[in-house]
Image (cartoon, rainbow, N blue to C red):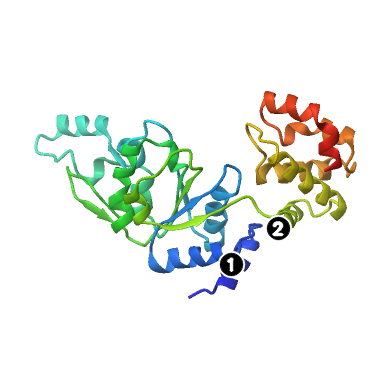
Amino acid sequence: MLTISDWTSALCRQRYLVEDSLATMINLAITLGRPLLVEGPAGSGKTQLAYALAKAMRRELIRLSCYEGLDASQALYDWNYQRQLTAIAQHADVNPFGPDFLLERPLLKALRSSGAVLLVDEIDRADEGFEALLLEYLADHQITIPEWNTVRAQSMPVTILTSNRTRSLSDALRRRCLYAYLDWPRADRELEIAALYADAVPHAVLTRIVAGIHCLRSWQLIKPPGLAETIDWALSQQVMGHPGWSREWVLATLGCVIKDTLDMSSVRSRIDELVAG
């Protein structure tokens, strides 16, 4: 059994830094065979956690991106109707609802895998009714296919669910998961993360970049910058030959961190505040 230190080190090698509290929940989720629900603001690194975990464990990552209207045929399984009709036409006694006619969707694929990491991304974007389709998988790592059989996990998948809290999730779903809240990191931790990706940028410049990001997050923007924006801003320094932190550079590269036209106008009107940090 891996220790908390083992998990933090393994994820750090994938350029993903975690606090001990999150590493503990990851360890428990894997050891107990329980799904892990990770909530937090958009851009705090929830999705990237699943990618880093899959790489650290050397397992396949299977991603289910949620959206309004998502149903079982896109998330669990479906039938190959054309193949069914062809088989029926050729063989009158064939059973069209057998495994040969089954189409794998992300959840079924995870159950049939050799212990993949399943990412159910932004579950709060799906309809409330979709949560009910997940409950059997979350509780028992199985899916019942009424026309055929119950498919159980061949090797226990690691399941990560993420939510930006755009709506409340059901108590039934929450009861079946362990829980972690992933907020935007502290300035010192965000500086460490930026340095992992843009190690050639001077420390003083990275410090100003992180301070600028935290300044922007305090301005009630429509889309405040997340960790990906911090990394992009730091990398832009690296690819531009380290021009340093200046008013001109900030104005020229605002598109790395501001992704909405109203936000852009607001930030440009306060550019001196941003440059001053």
Q: Nearer the viewer, residue 208 or 266?
A: 266
Question: Which residue is denoted by mark 1 in the rendering?
Answer: 20
Could you tell me which secondary element the residue under label 2 belongs to?
helix
Q: Is residue 90 above or below residue 149?
A: above
* Badge count: 2
Side of 119 relative to 244 (left or right):
left
Could you tell me which secondary element the residue under label 1 belongs to?
helix
Q: Which x, y percent locates residue 63?
A: 46, 45
**Residue at x 48%, y 38% (from the top left corner):** 166
How far is the residue under mark 1 from the one under mark 2? 13 Å
Q: Is residue 153 above or below residue 77?
A: below
**Residue at x 50%, y 57% (from the top left corner):** 180
Q: Which x, y percent locates residue 11?
A: 60, 62
Q: Which x, y percent locates residue 132?
A: 29, 44
**Residue at x 89%, y 32% (from the top left corner):** 248
- Amino acid beneath label 2: Arg
Residue 132: give its label. Answer: none
Residue 189: give its label. Answer: 2
- Amino acid beneath label 1: Asp
Q: Is residue 249 above or below residue 39?
A: above
Determine which quarter of the picture holds residue 266: top right
Q: Earlier in the sequence, mark 1 or mark 2?
A: 1
Q: How many other residues sit within 10 Å of disc 1, few (<14), some (14-19) or many (≥20)?
A: few
Q: Nearer the viewer, residue 41 or 33?
A: 41
Q: Is residue 144 above or below residue 261?
A: below
* Marks 1 and 2 in Cβ contact (< 8 Å): no
